[in-house]
Amino acid sequence: QVQLVESGGGLVQPGGSLRLSCAASGTIFSINDMGWYRQAPGKERELVAAVSSGGSTNYADFVKGRFTISRENAKVSLQMNSLKAEDTAVYYCNFRAVFRPGYNPRELWGQGTLVTVSS
């Protein structure tokens, strides 16, 4: 069974940087979109950034110019710079992938990694 394994969360001071990574374990035939979402306490999960199989990127307005998403093979990363207290949340990676030829794409979610921005 394919799983997404995240790493890189932690505690950082305002203005600091963190890099999140997410890699798939197991066999995937192809990956369409990859993305990062976040969920802060008491709030709904929201899209942070996404990258298509062709390399097109999409960012939420609140991270434009600060965060950069990248992908390589079955791994997606999120470089987060100039972090703010309001970036504190659990971050989840998401893949939309085809596991076998001829099958419809399915979504996979990582387990989540906590990012805390605080002095």
Image (cartoon, rainbow, N blue to C red):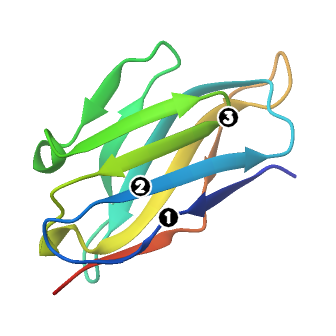
Query: Which residue is farthest top?
Result: 54
Q: Please tell me which of labels 2 and 3 falls first in the chain.
A: 2
Residue 11 image-quadrant placement: bottom left
Q: Secondary structure at mark 1?
A: loop
Give the vertical position of 103 relative to 77 (above or below). Answer: above
How dense is the environment of label 3, judged by Cα within 10 Å: few (below 14), some, or many (20 and up)?
A: some
Identity, as a three-letter code, of the amino acid under mark 3? Ala
Q: Secondary structure at mark 3?
A: loop
Q: Residue at x 42, y 29 (%)?
A: 51
How dense is the environment of label 2, judged by Cα within 10 Å: few (below 14), some, or many (20 and up)?
A: some
Q: Residue at x 35, y 62 (%)?
A: 38
Look at the numbered discs 1 and 2 and tell me whether their residues touch, using CB distance below 8 Å: yes
Disc nearest the viewer among 3 and 1? 1
- Which mark is drawn over residue 74? 3
Look at the numbered discs 2 and 3 and tell me whether their residues touch, using CB distance below 8 Å: no
- Which mark is drawn over residue 104? none
Check disc 1 and report the residue beneath it.
8
Q: Is residue 12 left or right of residue 99?
A: left
State the separation of the CA atoms marked 1 and 2: 6 Å
State the separation of the CA atoms marked 2 and 3: 17 Å
| Front residue of this view, candidates 111 and 85 | 85
| Front residue of this view, candidates 118 and 62 | 118
Look at the numbered discs 3 and 1 and tell me whether their residues touch, using CB distance below 8 Å: no
Check disc 2 and report the residue beneath it.
19
